[in-house]
Image: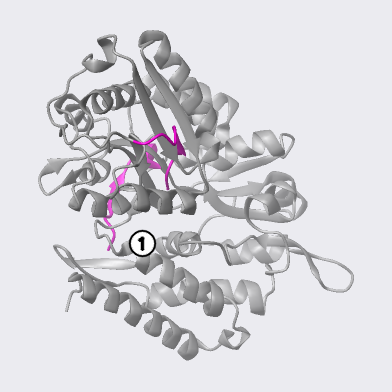
Amino acid sequence: MASKKLVSGGLAGMLVLTAMLSACSSSSNTSTGGTAQPGTSAADGKAVSLSIWTGWPELDPFFKKMAEDYKKTKPNVSIEISSFPLRDYEKKVAAALPSKSAADILPLNPNLALRYIEGKMLQTTPDDLVKQNNSGIHQKLIVDTTVVGGKSYGVPSFMGSGAIYYNKDMLKEAGLTEPPTVDNLLDYAQKLAKRDASGNLERAGMSLRLSGGGSGTGEKFWNILAQRGGSIVKEVSPGKFKADYNTEAGYQTLKLYVDMVHKLKTDDPKVKHDTEAFQTKAAAFYIRESNVIADTKKKAPDLNYDAAPLKANVISLINYYVSSTDKAKADAAWDFIRFVTKPENHKQMVAMSGWLPPRDDLDLNDLYKEYPQYKAFFTKQELQMYPAIAEFDEILTKFADRIATKGFTDPSFVDNPDKMKAFLNEAAKETNDILKKAGHLAE
C-alpha cells in the first residue's frame, strides 16, 4: 500500500503552493543541478528575476514576506508570486514545462513531479540541499520522495494531514465529555445531528466530503479508510501494486458514509459542508487539514473548538522544484529555497498559513499556546502517502468520481453489503486496469 511507517507526529499532515511570477523561464540549454552551492549568482550582484507559481492562495502572504525578507539580503534578486486555483495550476504546469515556459520555482506533489522528472524537465538538487534533506530533520518517508532513479530532485516544502475538528459547545450540550475518535464517529454523529420540527437536518453531526473537484473526495475517503488499516493501493512487491479498498476495511468505510447519509441521516448533501459548515455551526465535527486553524481565526474567531488526533494519517506532501535551465536563475532559485527552508522561516509558514512543515526539528510550544489545536497534528501515528507511481492521480481521481456520483448517492446501498461490495469490486477493477496499463499491477 502507500508507504506506511509509525513515525512522530511532526509529520501530521496532502497539494501545491502559490505562484511567483508568470514570467517565463529562460530557454537556455545550460543545465544546472547537483553542484551549485550557497552564494553563487544570487550574491554576485547580477540582476535576477525569479518567478514562482503555486496553487494555494493562503500561502501568498508567507511567500510575499519571504520574498521581501530575502531581497534585504540579496537586493539584486526580484521575486514575483502568482497563485492559481489548484487544478488550474496543475494544468498550467503541465502545459508550460514541456515548452520551457514554466515558473522558475514550482512547488509540486512529488507524485505529480515524477512525470516531469522522467521527462528531464526539472533540475537535480544541489549537493548542500541534498545534505539538508538527509540531515535527519525529515522522516525517511519524506526524504524518499526526493530521490528518483538514484538522483535527488526537490526539497520538502509543506504537507497536509488530517485531524478531527469538533465544536466544544455542541459536545457539552449533548452531554459528551470526550472528543470524538475514529472509533465513535457514527455514535457521535447521531448524538450531535440536529433536525427542525419537520425532521429536516439543520445541523450535521459529522460533515462528510461527499463531492468536490479532482481527487479530494477520494483523499477524504482514504483518510477514514486508513483508520482501519486500508489504503487505495497496496504495494505487493517492489513497484507492483493492486487496489486495496475492495476489502472489509473498504466496505466498512463505505458503509459508514451510506449509514450517515441515507440510513441515519446525520449528514445530507443539501446542507452546508466542510469548513464552511463547521465555521458557521452547520456541522458539529469533521476531518480536515491543519490550514483550517488559520482560516478559522480569520473567518470565525469566536468559534469554541478543538482538534483531536487520528490513529493514522494520509500525508499530502509538496516539495520545491526548480525548472529553469538558465544557470543564473536556477542558482538564485535554489538559494531562495535555502532561505525559505531555514528553521525560523519554515516555522513562520505554520503561523501564517496553517500548513505544516514536513520536518521534526522545530520547537512549536509557543504556537501551541496560541493555537492548541495544532497538537492534534503532532502525535505518533501511522502514516501513508501517495505511492511513487505517476498514474496514482488518475487512479484517485477516477475513484473519487465513482464514489461521489454513485457510492454516496445510492440509497439502495443501505443494509445491502453485497451491492456495496460489488460496487467496490467494480471500482477496483478500474484501478487495477490503470495499474496494468502503466506496468505496475501485481498480477
Q: How many marks?
A: 1
Q: Is residue 204 visible?
A: yes
Please tell me whether residue 348 is drawn above or below residue 373 in the rendered image: above
In the image shown, does 63 or 382 lie closer to the viewer? 63
* Secondary structure type for disc 1: helix
Instruction: Tell me where residue 214 appears, x and y as whole percent.
Output: 48, 61
Considering every residue shown, the one lying at the far left of the view is: 150
Is 12 within the magenta?
A: yes
Q: Nearer the viewer, residue 108 or 418?
A: 108
Q: Quadrant of residue 397?
A: bottom left
Residue in the image at 58% along x and 30% along y: 371
User: Residue 394 appears in which quarter of the rendering?
Assistant: bottom left
- Segment tinted magenta in the rendering: 1-24
Seen in the picture, residue 232 relative to 90 is either above or below; the reply is: below
Classified by dominant secondary structure, the portion drawn in magenta counts as: loop
User: Does residue 364 appear in the picture of this structure?
Assistant: no
Q: Nearer the viewer, residue 119 or 379?
A: 119
Q: Determine the residue positioned at 57% across, 75% down.
A: 408
State yes or no: residue 137 in magenta.
no
Residue at 59% from the left image edge and 48% from the top image edge: 165
Quick one: quadrant of the C terminus?
A: bottom left
Res 41 → quadrant: top left
Q: Quadrant of the N terminus?
A: bottom left
**Residue that lies at the very extreme toward the right in this rendered image:** 197
According to the picture, the residue beneath numbered tag 1 turns out to be 393
Image coordinates for residue 146, horizontal then vertical, percent = 22, 42
Q: Amino acid at mark 1?
A: Asp
Tell me the crowding category of disc 1: few under 14, some 14 to 19, or many 20 or more residues within 10 angstroms, Cα based: some
